[in-house]
């Protein structure tokens, strides 16, 4: 059983129309999706085919903001018209959610050609609505890996027409969608398809394609660097492919200025190790490399955007297996910065591999470090899968970090990072406890643990990806595996200017 190394690079053909939706264009598509103001004036409904019927149906069904109407049109291709009602104060998440529901309604008709438009919205709201419709369409048009021996004959969206009088280019939307699709593709692969060895092969292929430099720190190299935290996790696996992948993008203008480090947890399968998981808890643990997939997808999106700064991407790739060589509770290991760690629970392996990856990333003295990980169940318990958690060593960044979540529609909540939490992580036998035995507040203690491996003075934010997987998807993503984090990170860097902020601060 094999699949191609990387997803297809092809995306739907895009046609831009620098005017509003016209009646003659409707007949050329299999589906037309129009996001309208929830309080659309009666006269404006007439701009839509079957507008009078749609308005009457909306009144009869007492449709509110977030509602959807659809109807088949008596035209040559019998297109499906899908109308979504956007509230005047709808957030980006709510708008993405509406766009996702509209795409789901349209996909039932298996359209090959679709058109996207808005009606009755203010200019900024109209542009936001079109962006979310496009993001939802690009996600919906992308197929995750499938291993069925026979496949259903389904029609893919091959052509998208955008009716946009403002004439935006949507470069960031295309870049972010490609990064999200890559993250979802990799995360969806089963554990026997994405091992540490095959993961490295896929990343190497991608690096050649994108012009990134690649270096691989194998076990021997990590032993030389004293990376005992990472190696403790890796030693339980007979597979010798574990290691830390380092990718380098050097910027569109080869700038020697700001430098970003992306770090991702890449546990290709997590049994829990000696503290073995139950069946239900272990079932989906092929997705425990989702943080590395998000870091990689973010690197791809930033490459597509040709950002002017340097980006280093560090992927801590291993498996957490059980066996005679697996690490054990009460083992004491030494990380590459010399910190000794008293192991408490072998299922807290993510913070172990990230510890040495953060040390390596920090040795390059980046301007900013962002790390991504499906790290703790405690974060899911605190937030559910609708939000992800964020932690930072810069207290003043809280508003900016949460603003990126609001603006991108990938919502986050900042948790405390006060130093007094460290009192519970004090060890009688080592420099630090790996975690607490009772698990309370584990997402906070995990972040405090990781902060010990970020060099002093380097700004850092840690994203605990509680939203990496959610039954039924999230916002505009309809698959259970969401790729959450790419859209957030791109907004944080390009719109919120976090890297520039880090560069200005002492």
Image (tube, helix red, strand yellow):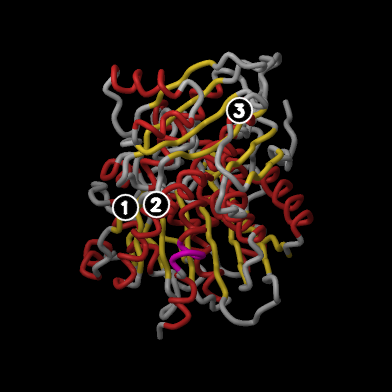
Magenta residues, start to end:
492-496
Q: Nearer the viewer, mark 3 or mark 2?
A: 3
- Residue 97: x and y in percent read 41, 37
Are the residues flagged by discs 2 and 1 in contact, CB closer than 8 Å? yes
Q: Which mark is residue 443?
A: 1
Q: Is residue 92 visible?
A: yes
Counting residues from the N terminus, which is met first, the one under dot 3 or under dot 1?
Answer: 3
The residue lying at 46 percent from left, 70 percent from top is: 497
- Residue 429: x and y in percent read 32, 65
The residue lying at 49 percent from left, 68 percent from top is: 369
Q: Is residue 130 above or below residue 66?
A: below
- Residue 273: x and y in percent read 46, 41
Separation (CA) of disc 3 from disc 1? 50 Å
Badge 1: residue crowd in 10 Å (few <14, some 14–19, many ≥20): many
Q: Is residue 407 above or below residue 160?
A: below
Q: Nearer the viewer, mark 2 or mark 1?
A: 2
Q: Is residue 412 above or below residue 96?
A: below
Q: The N terminus appears in which quarter of the rendering?
A: top right
Q: Which mark is residue 5?
A: none
Determine which residue is flagged by label 3: 26
Determine which residue is flagged by label 2: 464
Q: The C terminus appears in which quarter of the rendering?
A: bottom left
């Amino acid at each position: 059983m094999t699949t191609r190394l990387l997803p297809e690079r092809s995306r739907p053909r895009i046609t831009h129309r620098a005017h509003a939706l016209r009646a003659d264009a409707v007949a050329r598509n299999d589906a037309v999706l129009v996001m309208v103001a929830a309080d659309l004036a009666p006269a404006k409904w007439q701009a839509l085919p079957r507008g009078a019927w749609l308005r009457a149906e909306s009144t009869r069904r007492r449709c509110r903001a977030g509602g959807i109407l659809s109807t088949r049109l008596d035209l040559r291709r019998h297109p499906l018209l899908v109308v979504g009602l956007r509230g005047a104060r709808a957030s980006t998440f709510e708008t993405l959610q509406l766009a996702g529901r509209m795409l789901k309604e349209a996909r039932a008709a298996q359209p090959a050609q679709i058109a996207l438009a808005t009606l009755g919205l203010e200019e900024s709201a109209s542009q936001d609505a079109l962006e979310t419709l496009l993001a939802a369409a690009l996600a919906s048009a992308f197929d995750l890996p499938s291993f069925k021996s026979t496949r259903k004959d389904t029609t893919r969206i091959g052509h998208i027409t955008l009716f946009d009088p403002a004439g935006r280019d949507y470069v960031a939307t295309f870049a972010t969608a490609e990064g999200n699709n890559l993250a979802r593709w990799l995360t969806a692969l089963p554990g026997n398809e994405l091992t540490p060895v095959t993961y490295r092969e896929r990343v190497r292929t991608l690096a050649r394609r994108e012009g990134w430099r690649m270096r691989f720190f194998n076990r021997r190299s990590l032993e030389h660097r004293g990376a005992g935290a990472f190696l403790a996790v890796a030693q339980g696996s007979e597979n010798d492919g574990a290691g830390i992948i380092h990718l380098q993008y050097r910027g569109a203008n080869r700038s020697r200025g700001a430098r970003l480090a992306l770090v991702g947890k890449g546990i290709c399968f997590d049994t829990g190790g000696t503290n073995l998981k139950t069946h239900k808890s272990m079932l989906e643990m092929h997705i425990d490399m989702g943080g590395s997939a998000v870091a990689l997808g973010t690197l791809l999106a930033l490459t597509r955007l040709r950002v002017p700064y340097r980006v280093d991407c560090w992927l801590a790739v291993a498996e957490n297996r059980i066996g005679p060589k697996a690490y054990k509770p009460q083992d004491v290991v030494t990380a590459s910065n010399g910190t000794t760690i008293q192991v408490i629970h072998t299922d807290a392996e993510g913070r172990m591999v990230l510890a040495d990856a953060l040390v390596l990333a920090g040795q390059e003295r980046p301007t900013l470090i962002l790390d991504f990980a499906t790290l703790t169940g405690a974060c899911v318990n605190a937030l559910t899968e609708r939000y992800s958690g964020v932690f930072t060593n810069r207290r003043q960044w809280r508003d900016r970090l949460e603003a990126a979540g609001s603006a991108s529609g990938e919502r986050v909540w900042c948790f405390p990072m006060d130093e007094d939490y460290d009192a519970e992580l004090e060890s009688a036998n080592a420099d630090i406890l790996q975690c607490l035995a009772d698990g309370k507040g584990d997402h906070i203690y995990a972040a405090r643990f990781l902060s010990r491996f970020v060099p002093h003075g380097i700004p850092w934010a840690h994203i605990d990806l509680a939203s990496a997987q959610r039954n039924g998807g999230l916002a505009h993503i309809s698959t259970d595996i969401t790729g959450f984090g790419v859209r957030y990170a791109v907004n944080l860097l390009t719109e919120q200017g976090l890297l520039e902020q880090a560069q200005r601060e002492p």
